[in-house]
Image: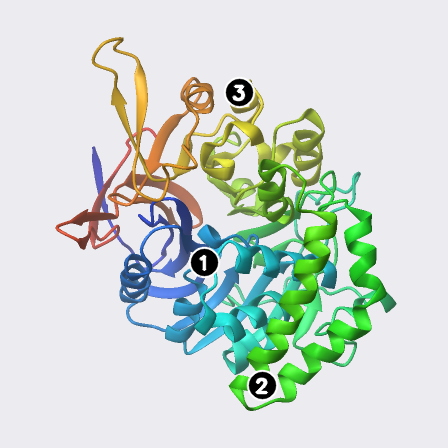
């Protein structure tokens, strides 16, 4: 193992998977030496105990040197095990500069809110809070948030350029992200909080690379090949009465009395129940459960092409990360659309792949792993990998919060184990990936545990200090 010491020109990227069990909570930060320059979170949820994720958000801020400002928060989709900790996280933040959400129509958001309420993900006392989260994010995130950005479905033939250009006079030390927004359309006005005069909520221009100078980039992908619940009868039923829903939403916003707000929300729930019972109830449970995942937002993040060009790196070395939430890559069309959008250049440089939907069989296709070829495949789920004492074959012991889901599927696990190092992040153990750069040259990578749960407490293993170890071959 090699060891090196931080220098004045040292920069690092530090990625964390937190031990939430069945769910997903990940973070990243970029540092110049000991100073945190930029931070982000992709999803913050679990089906497990809320006090665990509460402790983990505290540890996140401790790792941020108690700085309670978050630069970027991404919510991949509206499923409990990906958003359950968001409210707690927001309450601890002094400011969130940007929140990114998938673009959904009013009828889609209402359906997801009803699903969450019906499955008792939302407690009665939290009705107002989570109604706002699904329907009116402006109020949910309040004044703590500077900007809410929505990501539309990507076009079928769209492709992100491989390189992002910056003018020569831009300051290299500037870690402020610059966004490009598209003009809001007439239909967007029906979406309650997406108003032309509301500059807090914007829609990201398609094919946009969100870049921290010529150093690190973020790319969002919303699969165009998956249509969010194509039951037109249901959609039309809500669209016909969209004025009713928007009026009720405006009433909730204007009312100060919580009792009045809850009464209005209860009336909306009754109306949605009638539509649900008429149009959706008889659809198979498995298909209904997948509706929540059909808007799952992917995130690719990694070094810009400039880093490869201005160093003596092997151009094939992998330093990118691909997060999929509960996304779907079960068909050739799904994979081709993603691959085309990100470009071959990025698809060949995936170091860290968050396996979609916790390793579920229904969102995977045999041979997918050999097309992605990540160095590390991360399964965020509440399971332990063991050997069957009789057959000596691998099997999984499914722990609390995961016994109904039974993730990951063994076939999916084996497919990825052929080409990558598989890692399970469960309620007992997390993962850190640490990428170190010296004079703009990617130098070394450290991968190991970050948090362990012992005697109901999380023990933190700091993933960077003045001296640290890393793989010698990187």
Label 2 SS: helix
Q: Which of disc 3 and disc 2 is earlier in sequence?
A: 2
Bin the neighbour count of mark 1 within 10 Å (Cα to Cα): few under 14, some 14-19, many 20 and up. Answer: many
The residues bearing labels 2 and 3 have C-alpha atoms spaced at a distance of 55 Å
The residues bearing labels 1 and 2 have C-alpha atoms spaced at a distance of 35 Å
The residue wearing badge 2 is: 260
Q: Is residue 351 above or below residue 238?
A: above
Bin the neighbour count of mark 3 within 10 Å (Cα to Cα): few under 14, some 14-19, many 20 and up. Answer: some
Label 3 SS: helix
In this rendering, the label closer to the viewer, 1 or 2: 2
* Residue 172, image x, y percentages: 52, 63
As drawn, the label of residue 354 is none
Q: Which of disc 2 and disc 1 is earlier in sequence?
A: 1
Q: Is residue 235 above or below residue 269?
A: above
Bin the neighbour count of mark 2 within 10 Å (Cα to Cα): few under 14, some 14-19, many 20 and up. Answer: few
152 or 71, which is in the foreground? 152
Q: Where's the N terminus, which quadrant?
A: top left
Q: Which of disc 1 and disc 3 is earlier in sequence?
A: 1
Q: Is residue 151 visible?
A: no
The residue wearing badge 1 is: 41
Name of the residue lying farthest toward the top: 391
- Write the residue at 59% across / 61% down: 100
Q: How is the image coloured?
A: rainbow
Query: Is residue 301 left or right of 105 when viewed as pictured?
Result: left
* Residue 296, image x, y percentages: 60, 47
Q: Where's the C terminus, which quadrant?
A: top left
In this rendering, the label closer to the viewer, 2 or 3: 2
- Write the residue at 40% across / 75% down: 91
* Residue 340, image x, y percentages: 71, 35
The residue wearing badge 3 is: 370
């Amino acid at each position: 193992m090699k060891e090196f010491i931080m220098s004045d020109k040292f920069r690092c990227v530090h990625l964390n998977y937190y031990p939430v069990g069945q769910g997903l909570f990940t973070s990243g930060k970029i540092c110049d030496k000991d100073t945190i320059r930029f931070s982000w979170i992709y999803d913050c949820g679990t089906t497990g105990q809320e006090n665990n994720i509460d402790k983990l958000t505290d540890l996140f801020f401790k790792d941020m040197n108690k700085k309670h400002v978050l630069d970027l928060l991404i919510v991949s989709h509206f499923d409990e095990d990906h958003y359950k900790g968001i409210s707690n996280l927001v309450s601890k933040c002094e400011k969130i500069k940007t929140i990114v959400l998938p673009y959904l129509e009013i009828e889609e958001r209402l359906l997801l809110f009803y699903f969450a309420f019906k499955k008792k993900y939302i407690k009665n006392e939290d009705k107002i809070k989570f109604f706002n989260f699904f329907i009116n994010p402006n109020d949910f995130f309040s004044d703590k948030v500077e900007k809410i950005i929505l990501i539309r479905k990507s076009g079928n033939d769209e492709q992100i350029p491989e390189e992002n250009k910056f003018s020569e006079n831009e300051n290299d030390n500037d870690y402020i992200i610059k966004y490009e927004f598209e003009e809001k359309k007439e239909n967007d006005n029906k979406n309650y909080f997406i108003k032309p005069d509301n500059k807090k909520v914007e829609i990201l221009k398609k094919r946009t690379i969100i870049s921290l100078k010529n150093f690190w980039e973020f790319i969002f992908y919303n699969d165009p090949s998956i249509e969010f619940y194509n039951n037109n009868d249901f959609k039309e039923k809500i669209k016909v009465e969209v004025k009713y829903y928007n009026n009720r939403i405006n009433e909730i916003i204007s009312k100060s009395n919580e009792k009045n707000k809850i009464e209005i929300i209860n009336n909306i729930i009754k109306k949605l129940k009638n539509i649900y019972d008429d149009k959706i109830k008889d659809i198979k449970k498995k298909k209904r459960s997948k509706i929540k995942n059909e808007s799952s937002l992917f995130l690719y993040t990694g070094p810009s092409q400039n880093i490869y060009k201005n160093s003596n790196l092997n151009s094939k070395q992998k330093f990118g990360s691909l997060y999929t939430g509960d996304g779907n890559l079960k068909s050739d069309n799904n994979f081709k659309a993603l691959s085309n959008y990100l470009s071959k250049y990025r698809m060949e440089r995936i170091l860290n792949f968050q396996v979609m939907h916790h390793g579920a069989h229904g969102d995977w296709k045999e041979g997918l792993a050999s097309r992605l070829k990540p160095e590390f495949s991360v399964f965020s789920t509440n399971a332990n990998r063991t050997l069957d004492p009789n057959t000596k074959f691998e099997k999984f012991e499914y722990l609390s919060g995961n016994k109904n889901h039974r993730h990951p599927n063994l076939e999916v696990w084996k497919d990825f184990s052929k080409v990558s190092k598989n890692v399970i992040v469960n309620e007992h153990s997390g993962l850190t990936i640490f990428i170190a750069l010296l004079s703009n040259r990617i130098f070394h990578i450290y991968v190991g545990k970050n948090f362990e749960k012992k005697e109901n407490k999380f023990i933190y293993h700091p993933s960077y200090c003045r001296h640290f170890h890393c793989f010698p071959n990187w």
